[in-house]
C-alpha cells in the first residue's frame, strides 16, 4: 500500500461524537480495571481514526495549497478540530479521576496523567470560539506567505525557491534576491502586522479566561513543559548569551574574511565560501538513492525504516508551485506511517531534510507500537534531539553527497548549528516580550525585535534595508505566528545533538545505543527524564552549555577554513 492509497473520507462528526461519548461512558462506568483498560483502548482507536483523516487533509493540503477539494477540507478541519480537542478534554477529565487509576498507571506509566493534567489546564469550552479564530489566523498567515510570487531572474518563484539565490556566489544576486524577499514582506507589512496582532490578543484573552496571568504560562502548558519553567529558560538564554554569542560573532568574522569582505551584510550570511557553499552533487533521485545506501549502512534499524518510507512513498520532497513552504515530518496513526514533507531546492538543505526529517520519522517509527497516542511523540524539544542528532550520526556518509566538498559541508553544518542558537534565543526572548506586553503597538514590537538582534546577533547589518532595520525580519519566522514559544526547543535539542556528535566521534556504538534508547522511549517520559535515559546533560544547569560547546569550538577552531 502506498500513501496515495491511504483513504480520505470526511468524518461524520455527529456519529464520531456519539461513538466517542459511548466509549467514554464505558470507561466511566467500568466495574473492573480490565474493562476500564479496554474502554481506554476503544477511545484511542476512535481518536486514531479521526486524527488519521485530519492528518491526510493537512498533508494533502500542504502539498498543493491550490487544490480546492483539500482547501475546503482544511477549512472543515479548522472548524472541527477545537470540538475534537474538547472531547479529548472530557476524556482527560475522566482519566485523571479514573476509578482504577492505580492499575492504569501500572499499565501505561504515570506520564499520561501529567500530560492530561496539563491539557486540562489549557482548555475550557469558554475558549472554543477563540481557538477557532486562532486557527483561522494561522491559516491566513500560511496562505499569505505561500502566495508570494517573486519575479526573479526571469521566473516567478516562491520564498523557498529564492533560497538558492540567497546563497549565490555573486554578491549582486544575493543582494537583489534578499531585497526582493524583504520587499515581499514589506509590501504585506500591514497584513502581517494585523494577523499577528490579532493572534496575540486572542491568545492573551484565552490565557486570562483560563485563569493564567498571561499567555506565557498558557503557552508553556500547551507545550507540555512539565519539568521546566520560564525562569529556567531565561537562565538558559543567559548561558547562550555568555558562552555562545561571542564565539558566534567570531565565526561571522571568519566568514567575512573567507568572503574577502570588509563588512558582512545580512545578505552575505547565507554564503559560507567564495568558492560556493557545499551543495549535493546530484539531483533529487540521486540524493534519495544515496540516502538508501546511507541508512542501510548506518544500522539495520535505519535500513528497515528507510525501506518502509520508500516502499510506501511517504516522502514528498520536491519544491512545486502552490506547495506550502518549509518542511515537516508527521505521523498517520491508522497506517502507522511517518510522512516527510519538504521543498528540495538544490542546496545542502536537501541533505538536511534527508537526515533531519528522517530522524523525526525514525523516532516515531521506533515508538509506533505504544498503545497511547500521547507516547508516540515526546514533547517538541525532545523531538528535535532525534532529528538533529541524526544529522550528526550520518556525518560519515556525507562524502556520498558532497564528494570533495565534504569537509566544507561539515564545517558549515557545525558552524551553522552554532550560529543558529543565538538567533533561536532572540526569537524566544522576543516572544516572552510580546506575550508579557500584549498591548504594545506593532512598531514597538518591531523595535524590540531589532534590539534583540543587536543583543544576540551583534554582527548583523542590514545595509539600508529600512524595513529590516525597523525590525521586520521576524515576519518570515512562521513559528512566531503559528507555534508560540516553540523555538527555543530547537536550541535545546541542538545542544543535546552536539553531545551526540561528540560522543559518536569517540565511540559510535555506544552513542548509537543511547540514541536508539531515546527514540524507543517516544514520549513516555518528560524532557529532563528522557535526557537521563540518553545519558545527556541537563542544559538548564549552569555550566552545561559551556561544557557542551567546548569540543565544538575546538573542532571549528581547528579547521583551516581559508583553504576550503
Ligand atoms: Zn525538526
Image (cartoon, rainbow, N blue to C red):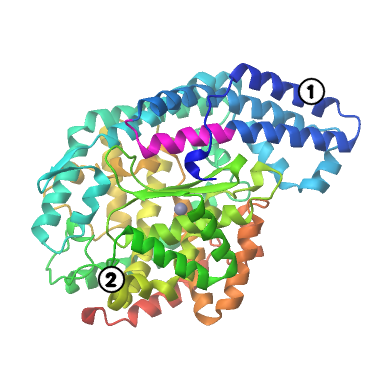
Residue at numbered disc 1: 25
Ligand 1 closer than 8 Å to label 1 CB: no
User: Which residue corresponds to the image point at 46% horizontal and 35% vertical from the top-left?
Assistant: 58
Q: Going by the picture, which residue comes out furthest to the right? A: 31
Residue 63 or residue 190, whichever sits in front: 63
* Quarter of the view holding residue 305: bottom right
Residue 77 vertical placement versus 527 (above, below): above
Residue 450 vertical placement versus 443 (above, below): below
User: Which secondary structure lies at badge 2?
Assistant: helix
Mark 2: give few (<14), some (14-19) or many (20+) Cα within 10 Å: few
Residue 102, image x, y percentages: 85, 42
Residue 500, image x, y percentages: 52, 70
Question: Overall secondary structure of the magenta stretch?
Answer: helix
Q: Going by the picture, which residue comes out furthest to the top? A: 14
Question: Do we see residue 205 in this rendering?
Answer: no
User: Which residue corresponds to the image point at 68% horizontal and 37% vertical from the top-left?
Assistant: 116
Residue 162 lies in the magenta-colored region: no
Residue at numbered disc 2: 250
* Quarter of the view holding residue 182: top left
User: Which residue corresponds to the image point at 69% horizontal and 35% vertical from the top-left?
Assistant: 45
Residue 287 vertical placement versus 106 (above, below): below
In the visual, does 191 lie left or right of 22?
A: left
Magenta segment boundaries in residue numbering: 51-66
Residue 69 or residue 376, whichever sits in front: 69
In the visual, does 167 lie left or right of 284?
A: left
Residue 562 or residue 564, whichever sits in front: 564
Mark 1: give few (<14), some (14-19) or many (20+) Cα within 10 Å: some
Residue 72 vertical placement versus 437 (above, below): above
Quadrant showing the N terminus: top right
Amino acid at each position: 500500500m502506498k500513501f496515495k492509497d491511504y483513504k480520505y473520507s470526511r468524518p461524520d462528526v455527529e456519529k464520531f461524537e456519539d461513538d466517542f461519548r459511548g466509549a467514554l461512558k464505558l470507561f466511566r462506568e467500568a466495574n473492573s480495571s480490565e474493562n476500564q483498560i479496554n474502554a481506554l483502548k476503544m477511545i484511542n482507536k476512535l481518536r486514531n481514526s479521526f486524527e488519521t483523516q485530519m492528518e491526510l487533509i493537512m498533508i494533502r493540503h500542504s502539498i498543493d495549497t491550490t487544490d480546492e477539494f483539500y482547501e475546503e477540507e482544511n477549512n472543515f478541519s479548522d472548524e472541527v478540530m477545537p470540538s475534537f480537542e474538547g472531547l479529548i478534554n472530557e476524556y482527560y477529565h475522566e482519566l485523571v479521576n479514573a476509578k482504577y487509576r492505580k492499575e492504569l498507571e501500572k499499565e501505561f506509566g504515570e506520564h499520561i496523567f501529567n500530560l492530561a493534567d496539563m491539557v486540562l489546564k489549557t482548555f475550557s469550552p469558554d475558549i472554543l470560539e477563540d481557538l477557532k479564530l486562532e486557527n483561522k489566523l494561522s491559516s491566513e498567515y500560511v496562505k499569505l506567505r505561500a502566495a508570494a510570487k517573486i519575479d526573479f531572474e526571469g521566473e516567478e518563484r516562491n520564498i523557498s525557491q529564492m533560497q538558492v539565490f540567497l546563497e549565490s556566489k555573486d554578491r549582486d544576486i544575493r543582494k537583489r534576491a534578499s531585497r526582493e524577499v524583504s520587499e515581499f514582506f514589506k509590501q504585506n507589512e500591514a497584513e502581517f502586522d494585523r494577523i499577528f496582532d490579532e493572534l496575540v490578543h486572542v491568545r492573551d484573552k484565552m490565557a486570562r479566561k483560563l485563569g493564567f496571568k498571561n499567555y506565557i504560562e498558557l503557552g508553556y502548558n500547551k507545550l507540555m513543559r512539565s519539568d521546566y519553567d520560564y525562569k529556567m529558560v531565561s537562565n538558559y538564554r543567559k548561558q547562550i548569551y555568555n558562552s555562545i554569542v561571542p564565539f558566534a560573532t567570531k565565526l561571522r568574522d571568519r566568514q567575512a574574511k573567507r568572503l574577502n569582505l570588509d563588512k558582512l551584510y545580512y545578505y552575505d550570511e547565507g554564503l559560507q565560501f567564495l568558492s560556493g557553499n557545499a551543495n549535493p552533487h546530484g539531483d533529487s533521485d540521486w540524493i534519495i538513492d544515496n540516502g538508501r545506501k546511507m541508512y542501510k549502512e548506518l544500522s539495520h534499524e535505519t535500513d528497515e525504516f528507510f525501506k518502509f518510507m520508500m516502499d510506501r512513498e511517504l516522502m514528498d520532497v520536491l519544491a512545486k508551485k502552490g506547495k506550502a513552504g518549509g518542511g515537516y515530518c508527521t505521523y498517520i496513526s491508522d497506517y502507522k506511517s511517518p510522512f516527510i514533507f519538504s521543498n528540495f531546492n538544490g542546496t545542502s538543505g536537501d541533505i538536511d531534510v534527508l537526515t533531519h526529517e528522517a530522524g523525526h520519522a525514525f523516532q516515531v517509527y521506533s515508538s509506533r507500537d505504544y498503545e497511547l497516542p500521547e507516547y508516540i511523540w515526546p514533547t517538541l524539544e525532545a523531538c528535535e534531539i532525534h532529528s538533529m542528532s541524526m544529522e550528526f550520526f550520518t556525518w560519515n556518509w556525507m562524502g556520498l553527497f558532497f564528494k570533495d566538498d565534504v569537509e566544507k559541508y561539515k564545517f558549515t553544518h557545525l558552524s551553522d548549528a552554532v550560529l543558529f542558537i543565538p538567533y533561536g534565543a532572540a526569537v524566544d526572548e522576543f516572544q516572552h516580550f510580546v506575550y508579557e506586553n500584549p498591548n504594545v503597538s506593532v512598531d514597538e514590537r518591531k523595535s524590540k525585535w531589532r534590539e534583540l538582534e543587536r543583543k544576540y546577533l551583534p554582527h548583523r547589518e542590514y545595509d539600508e534595508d529600512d524595513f529590516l532595520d525597523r525590525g521586520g525580519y521576524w515576519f518570515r519566522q512562521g513559528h512566531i505566528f503559528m507555534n508560540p514559544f516553540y523555538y527555543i526547543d530547537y536550541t535545546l535539542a541542538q545542544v543535546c545533538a552536539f553531545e551526540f556528535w561528540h560522543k559518536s566521534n569517540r565511540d559510535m556504538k555506544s552513542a548509537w545505543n543511547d540514541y536508539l534508547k531515546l527514540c524507543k522511549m517516544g514520549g513516555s517520559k518528560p524532557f529532563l527524564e528522557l535526557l537521563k535515559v540518553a545519558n545527556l546533560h541537563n542544559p538548564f544547569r549552569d555550566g552545561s552549555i559551556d561544557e557542551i560547546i567546548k569540543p565544538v569550538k575546538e573542532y571549528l577552531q581547528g579547521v583551516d577554513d581559508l583553504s576550503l
